[in-house]
Amino acid sequence: MTARFPWIPLAAACALVACGGDGDGTAPTAPTGPVAIPQLAAATPAALVGSCADLATRLAGLANTTLSASTEIAAGTLSVGGQAVPAHCQVTGKMFERTSTADGNTYAIGFELRLPLAWNGRFFHQGNGGIDGSVVPATGATGGGALTHALHQGFAVLSSDAGHGAALGPFFGLDPQARLDYGYQAAMKLTPMAKSLLAGAYGKAPDRSYFGGCSNGGRHVFNAFARMPDQYDGYLAGAPGYNLPKAAVANIFGAQRYASVASNPADISTGFTSAERVTVANAVLARCDALDGATDGLVQDVRACQATFSLAADVPTCSGARDGSCLSADQKNAIAQIFRGATTSTGAAVYSSFPYDAGLGAGGIAFWEFTAPVALDSGAVGVIFAVPPADPATFNGPVFSLTGSIDAMVASINATNASFTESAMQFMTPPNPTQLSAVRDRGAKIMVYHGVSDAIFSADDSVAWAQGVATNHSDAADFARLYLVPGMGHCSGGPATDQFDMLSALVDWVERGVAPASVTASARGTGNAGGVNAEVPAGWAANRSRPLCPWPLVARYNGSGSLDTASSFSCRT
């Protein structure tokens, strides 16, 4: 079977990770390209000036901003991985409050900043998930069941609702400005405000600024480095939905294919049952597990697997009734279309292909494949992204998703009119995300991680981004790296080593020049302080570890040593 994804030749791919030499994935000490990248200095600590209680009053003059409260949070009120978060000051407020002329609702950019009493001199802008709408705790957690996060490490952390409230659901999409704030403008408005607030609170602006998040939060990160390359020094994006409108339409395309083979028309999950998904996952393992040199329940060589595994040949075709151990010919046809990538009626690609991986049988897959298309993607595509938006009085999400025209949806996310002057593909996506000279030339760094079994935002799309960066920058390895996480689903979970601290690695790269040749990740088995992942296979050690390698390098077995220990594997081509 030929590869479904257009992987670029190794010579071009090596530009992203500086492979070659001794083949261990270690980045060179000198830049690979013609530009001398500056080394940024490390941040220095500072203490909060004055008391937290009067902070909101002292800083009341921030432009277009209303601070509602500043409250000291005692040490230990929050904890992560069993460790108490130090004392900090929680500041809440809103920006640019207004009444919409489009729908009559009140809008504002709600936010909170958590300021450590003992500050490390760094600012972390937390990009949140889904359609935003809530000011979730500003902790800056990243990477599976985190044992640490930005607030715990001493960062000042910002969280926002991106300009609308949760009560509106997707119907904030009726207001043109709310769409733009959600897409990118809220982050651009919040950034200078937050830095000014920090300068007033600590007597100095942050020495170093970071932007991080997963899913839609990862999309926010991509927009930040594309639209604000002068404002942040480090960018950490997980499962970046940087083509989110396309991905949402593609997920609806998938739901329609599942519905076409569902044994129960009222339940599209019967188009690809849990038992059938486990059967396919086991078939992927049977064909691909050993490609990295170890039969260990993880498919590290993702590229080779896509060229080796065949849904048609490697999964039994049912000769009679479906019983979970096989797929019908119609199922294979429908599922293959989804993995090859959604298309329009003329065969034009809508989004991206998806890689076959061992995490396909994990429990979290079902939500993204069968619930999200009708409960989430329907409102996003029909109301937030479409021009014109659907009429809320008559809109029905399941009907829209299961009977709507994919061609019409693709047209709607690219459309504009007099009221909605930016299409969804303009306000939601980063402009020129692979042209990163402005990021590189100021010494900033980008780290991206993506679960190979992510069912909503494809790891193939992140690889496409990495390919583009490598093509456009011969020195890409010096400032941008992608780490695939085999078995991991959307942001976390699945049969994977999904617990890792990329934030510390990013800080070391930005401020100390220590390039992350690999990042050690661990499983979250029984007793894990950051939360147990129930999908860790029974045969694994509870703390199994693996190196996450910068793409396109693969964690290959060294030929000896424990299969549960990262040191038994090396990042190689």
Image (spheres, helix red, strand yellow):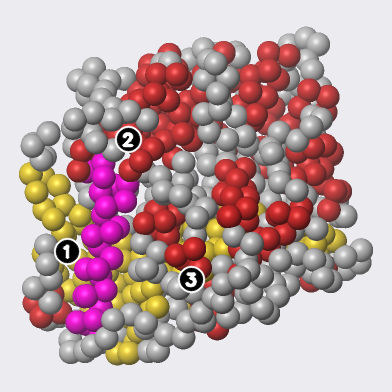
Sequence order check: which comes first, mark 3 or mark 1? 1
Q: Main secondary structure of the magenta part?
A: helix
Q: Which residue is mark 3?
A: 441
Q: Is residue 463 above or below residue 17?
A: above
Q: Is residue 367 above or below residue 346?
A: below
Q: Is residue 464 above or below residue 205?
A: above
Q: Position of residue 571 (x, y in %)?
A: 77, 64
Residue 423, numbered label: 2
Quadrant of the frame with the C terminus: bottom right
- Residue type at mark 1 is Gly
Q: Is residue 511 left or right of residue 423?
A: right
- Residue type at mark 2 is Ser
Q: How many neighbours does mark 2 have within 10 angstroms: few (below 14), some (14-19), or many (20 or more)?
A: many
Q: Of the residues tagged 3 and 1, which is closer to the observer?
A: 3
Residue that lies at the very extreme toward the right in this rendered image = 559
- Residue 452 or 317: which is nearer the viewer? 452
- Given contact means CB atoms under 8 Å apart, are the residues at marks 3 and 1 in contact? no
Q: Is residue 102 left or right of residue 144?
A: left
Q: Is residue 470 visible?
A: yes
Q: How many neighbours does mark 3 have within 10 angstroms: few (below 14), some (14-19), or many (20 or more)?
A: some
Q: Is residue 494 above or below residue 351?
A: below
- Residue 569 or 9: which is nearer the viewer? 9
Sequence order check: which comes first, mark 3 or mark 2? 2
Q: Residue at x 25, y 78 (%)?
A: 198
Quadrant of the frame with the N terminus: top right
Q: Of the residues tagged 2 and 1, which is closer to the observer?
A: 2
Q: Which residue is mark 1?
A: 93
Q: Of the residues tagged 3 and 2, which is closer to the observer?
A: 3
